[in-house]
């Protein structure tokens, strides 16, 4: 059989595009830089949404919706913000056959429009904290698009909060970082992430601090999976988000913003995928167990397979049935591998005669005959085991490709094939600029114990340097 995918080791970017196409996850949209997310890809995104939304709500935030179109003047109220986003803005100048009195920006992010309404909704300390989240699309005109990773339009969630004190805002930005984002990425996506503070050069436009979660892709590069920002009082001053304190004084609120996007889908592919396609972690998978009829010869195989599917569903396992007798089994099996179903349960005439089904695990391809009455138990065990195994594999791969170095030259050299971990004091602002010239960036800074620092001024910070997507 001709190979379906370009091998990862041969051409990783081509392999990535092959997986997206062959697993029917997405397609390029009609306008350069846009994408069409197909049902298989959108089902994964829906699961991501559900898991993330539950965690965000557990942290106290409520969902709302704000307009797609933002007056250009809103962005200009926060100087760093408009400067940071200017190259990526899509601007509407005409509508309804007429030139608009004021150009309208298609939202690249919503700090400004949400800030405008926070200013209207907050008047007293009793109105704080105000914790909002939005699921929406955003537009950032991308010069070098790549499906899921960098597209001119993408889907995301963006949280925006206002607090009475800097300490409360900082605590909440970190709560989202760890309890919503890191927990989801580690325990659902099975992706180990390094969590740290961005340098001043990498900080979000208009923020006082930016924290990020960085994952290693299969080719040793870094991918920013999510960010959480402390905005200080920059936006509250620009949009007059002020409140009367308990003592009666008028104060400006302290705000945060934080977001993750469909980029996580690209990260999932690049972290767990192999030469046979996608591998979806069981806790995330829209279909955890894919029951397949190998062949129907009139002996009741299809009926038995349907009963297995129903038993799996009754046990709380997301299961689907493939009983297509008009499509060759080999082709269907390859397709199931490409789409990354964690477990396949194959039932054929011989299996049924022996009272068995064959359990095939996507993670390592292991095939095991299992008694029909034990299928539910064995599938559940395989799902639990392989969820952890995928995380362990990814963590081991990251450790193997991370080098501890002491000089910037060695860090740049190490970043050709993986990550470099180096004292920030050996890099500094000048060293960061030099690394950027070599297409290497400082992904984040952390303390020696791996925790997130409170500021860039702390001593003995450790930097992660890598090439990135």
Image (cartoon, grey):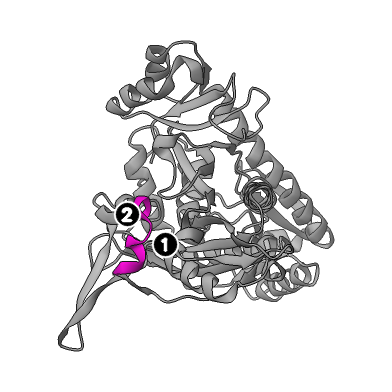
- For the residue labelled by badge 2, is the local secondary structure a helix, a strand or a loop? helix
Q: Is residue 5 left or right of residue 61?
A: left
The x, y position of residue 192, in whole percent, is 61, 38
Q: Is residue 420 visible?
A: yes
If you read the primary sequence from the N terminus, does the residue marked by circle 1 or circle 2 appear first? 2
Residue under pointer 1? 109
**Could you say which quadrant of the image residue 76 lies in?**
bottom left
**Could you say which quadrant of the image residue 415 lies in?**
top left
* C-alpha separation, residue under disc 1 versus residue under disc 2: 9 Å
Front-lying residue, 26 or 329: 26
- For the residue labelled by badge 1, is the local secondary structure a helix, a strand or a loop? loop
- Is 81 magenta? The answer is yes
The answer to whether mark 1 and mark 2 are in CB contact below 8 A is: yes
Q: Is residue 126 above or below residue 357?
A: below
The secondary structure making up most of the magenta span is helix
Q: In this view, does 386 lie above or below 446?
A: below
Q: What stretch is highlighted in magenta?
A: 72-82
């Amino acid at each position: 059989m001709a190979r379906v995918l370009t091998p990862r080791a041969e051409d990783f970017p081509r392999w990535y595009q092959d997986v997206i196409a062959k697993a029917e996850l997405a397609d390029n949209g009609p306008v350069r830089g846009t994408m069409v997310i197909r049902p298989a890809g959108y089902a994964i995104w829906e699961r991501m949404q559900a898991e993330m939304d539950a965690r965000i709500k557990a942290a106290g935030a409520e969902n709302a919706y704000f307009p797609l179109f933002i007056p250009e003047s809103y962005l200009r109220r926060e100087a760093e913000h408009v400067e940071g986003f200017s190259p990526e803005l899509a601007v509407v100048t005409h509508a309804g056959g007429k030139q608009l009195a004021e150009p309208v920006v298609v939202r690249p992010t919503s700090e400004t429009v949400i800030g405008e309404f926070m200013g209207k909704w907050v008047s007293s300390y009793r109105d704080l904290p105000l914790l909002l989240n939005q699921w929406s699309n955003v537009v950032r005109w991308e010069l070098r698009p790549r499906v899921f990773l960098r597209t001119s339009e993408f889907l995301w969630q963006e949280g925006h909060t206002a607090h009475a004190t800097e300490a409360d805002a900082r605590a909440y930005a970190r709560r989202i970082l760890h309890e919503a984002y890191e927990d989801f990425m580690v325990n659902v996506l099975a992706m180990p992430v390094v969590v740290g503070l961005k340098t001043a050069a990498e900080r979000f436009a208009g923020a006082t601090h930016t924290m990020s979660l960085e994952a290693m892709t299969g080719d040793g590069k870094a991918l920013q999976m999510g960010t959480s920002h402390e905005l200080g009082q920059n936006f509250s001053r620009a949009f007059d988000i002020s409140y009367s304190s308990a003592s009666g004084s008028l104060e400006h609120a302290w705000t945060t913003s934080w977001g993750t996007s469909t980029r996580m889908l690209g990260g999932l592919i690049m972290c767990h995928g192999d030469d046979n396609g996608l591998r979806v972690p069981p806790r995330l998978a829209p279909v955890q167990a894919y029951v397949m009829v190998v062949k129907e010869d009139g002996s009741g195989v299809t009926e038995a397979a349907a009963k297995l599917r129903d038993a799996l569903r009754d046990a709380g396992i997301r299961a689907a049935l493939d009983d297509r007798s008009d499509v060759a089994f080999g082709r269907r099996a390859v397709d199931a591998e490409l789409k990354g179903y964690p477990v396949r349960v194959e039932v054929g005439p011989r299996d049924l005669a022996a009272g068995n089904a064959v359990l095939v695990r996507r993670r390592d391809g292991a095939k095991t005959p299992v008694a029909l009455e034990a299928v539910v138990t064995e599938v559940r065990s395989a799902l639990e085991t392989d969820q952890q195994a995928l995380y362990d594999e990814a963590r081991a791969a990251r450790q193997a490709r991370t080098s501890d170095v002491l000089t910037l030259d060695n860090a740049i050299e190490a970043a050709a094939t993986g990550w470099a971990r180096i004292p920030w004091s050996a890099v500094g602002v000048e060293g960061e600029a030099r690394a950027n010239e070599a297409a290497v960036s400082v992904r984040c800074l952390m303390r020696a114990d791996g925790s997130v620092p409170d500021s860039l001024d702390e001593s003995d910070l450790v930097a992660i340097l890598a090439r990135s997507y």
